Image (tube, grey):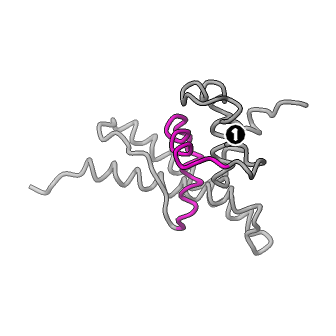
Amino acid sequence: MARPSNAAKLAARHRTWPLDEALHKAALDYGLEPLALQLQRPLSTLANSLNPDTPERRPTLELFLAVAGETQDERILDAFLSLFPGRAWFTLLDSGLECHELLRVFVDLSKKSSRAVDAMITALEDGVIDEDEWPALEYDLRRLLAATQGLMQLAESKRRAAP
C-alpha cells in the first residue's frame, strides 16, 4: 500500500475531525511507541484504547487529557470545540512583534480569509453544505476566527492610552 503524499497528509489535517478520530490521529502522528513510553502505558493497551474502530475500548478522560497534553495536537482542540458551536480558540501572539512581523500576521489572516471564502463558495455551488463538506469548511472558518481574534488581541496589547 502506497504511503500518503505530504499534500494528502496536509489536506487531511485541514478539517475538523470527530473527537475520537482526532485523538487517534494525534497519537499516530506523535508516534504510538514514544507516546506509550512517555505516558507509561503498555503500547497495545494505548493503541486499542485510541483506535476508533474498537468501540468496545474507549479512552478514559484521564487518557484523553494525557494524550492531548503530551501531543499538543491542534486537531484535538478543534474537535473538542466543534462541540461548542460559535466558539474557537486562538494562539496568543507576542505583543513584542516588530512591524514587519505584524504585517506577516496580517498576510496570514488574509490568506485564511481567502481560503475560508473559497471553501464556502465551493461548498455552496449546489446550494447546500453537505456533511462531507462541513469538516473542511468548519476548519477554515474556525482558523479565520482564531487568526482574527489573535490579531485583535495583539492590536489591543499595542494600544496606547490617549495623553
Q: Is residue 157 above or below residue 94?
A: below
Magenta region, main secondary structure? helix
- Hey, which residue is sitting farthest left in the picture? 163
Residue closest to the far bottom: 127
**Residue positioned 57% across, 51% down in the render:** 112
Q: Name the amino acid type tagged 1.
A: Leu
Residue at (57%, 52%) from the top-left corner?
A: 78
Residue 42 horizontal side relative to residue 98, left or right: right
Q: Which residue is mark 1?
A: 10
For the view shown, which residue lies furthest in the right direction? Answer: 1
Crowding at dot 1, Cα within 10 Å, few <14 / some 14-19 / many 20+, comes out as few
Q: Residue at x 42, y 42 (%)?
A: 103
> Quadrant of the rendered structure where residue 43 is?
top right
Q: Is residue 20 above or below residue 50?
A: below
Quadrant housing the C terminus: bottom left
The one nearer the camera, 143 or 22, is 22
The residue at the point 49 percent across, 58 percent down is: 88
Count of numbered circles in the view: 1
Q: Per the image, is 64 magenta? A: yes
Position in image of residue 54 (x %, y %)? 77, 47
Residue in front for this viewpoint, 112 or 18: 18
Depth check, front residue: 94 or 73: 73
Name the quarter where the N terminus is drawn.
Answer: top right
The picture places residue 127, in percent across and down from the top left corner, at 76, 75
Residue interval drawn in magenta: 58-85
- Residue 162: % across, % down: 13, 57
State left or right for residue 61 relative to residue 10: left
Q: Element under label 1?
A: helix
Quadrant in the picture for residue 25? top right
